Image: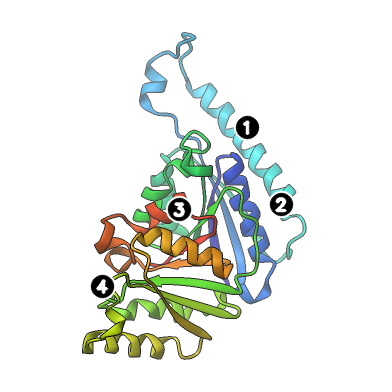
Amino acid sequence: MKTLLVPVDFSSSSNNSVRYAAKLSLDPGNEIGHIILLHSYYVSIYEQILPSPDLVQVGEKEVREKRQEVKDHLAALSRDLFSGIDQRIIVEQVCSRLPLIRAILNQVEEKKPDLLILGSNSNGDPAESNIGAQVIWIAKTSAVPVLVVPAETSFTVPNRVLLPCDFRTLSNIDLLKSLADSHSWIKKDLLVLNVDPGLKRAQPDEKFKAVLDRLNAWLKNIPHEIYYSDEPDILRGILDFAEEKQVDLVIALPGKHSFLYSLTHKSITEALSVNAEKPVLILK
């Protein structure tokens, strides 16, 4: 059975990611048996030593009270959102005094989750959620796949999934093995989009043909189609394509194999988690 890790800070975007996880777990085909709700109530040493503008210092008593408040809030959230799911699914509530990213990495190391679900802020507004403000760094440091859920996105079964690629940098096509191994995410159609403003496909060389052959080989058991975009603005081309085809999920390859890396020097995480209206699954 699979485990989901969902950081929570009780913001609207964070609560939406928990709601998304609950809906995701309703599908028996996803084999989800354990959901971890994680809250970091970290209080920095500066807050404990230096008084606030109201001349109030944060002491151990206040920390204990905050921890109990968080526990009560997590329990209420769990009751509200998970009361209707399969009772065999374990919903665990974890409170940590560690800073957010360290708390997440600690849970990843200890609990070995299969997927980390993060809520991103509306229009990238850092004031909305501490988790949303750090979604880029969390995604970059996570050792497990990350699903970034936009703040106002409701769960839908991912029948149409978009995989943007840059064939010029996809030298290690074996990265798609993790996609082939987790194809339960894909219920129907996988749309592979090669962003090719230089029209290299018009006169494909041997390397281009080899990448295309290996791509089809890896995805032979997944219904898929390959498309091309001539849009010079890479991100705009991808987002426009996603809107036109009404995709439910965007899948991103990691690191330098991301479709944006060599052309814009920006990670896919930064580009899509802020701009997309669709959930983004970042493979590892």
Pointer 4 residue = 169
Secondary structure under tag 4 reads: loop
Q: Is residue 179 or residue 276 the one in the foreground? A: 276
Mark 4 or mark 2: which is in front?
4
Query: Crowding near pointer 1: few (<14 within 10 Å), some, many (20+)?
Result: few
Pointer 1 residue = 69
CB atoms of marks 1 and 3 within 8 Å: no
Label 2 and label 1: CA atoms lie apart by 18 Å
Mark 1 or mark 4: which is in front?
4
Secondary structure under tag 3 reads: helix
Label 2 and label 3: CA atoms lie apart by 24 Å
Labels 2 and 1: the sequence-earlier one: 1
Labels 4 and 3: the sequence-earlier one: 4
Label 1 and label 4: CA atoms lie apart by 49 Å
Looking at the rendered structure, the kind of residue marked 4 is Thr
Measured as percent of width and height from the top left, residue 136 is found at: 39, 49
Q: Residue visible at 58% across and 66% down?
A: 248
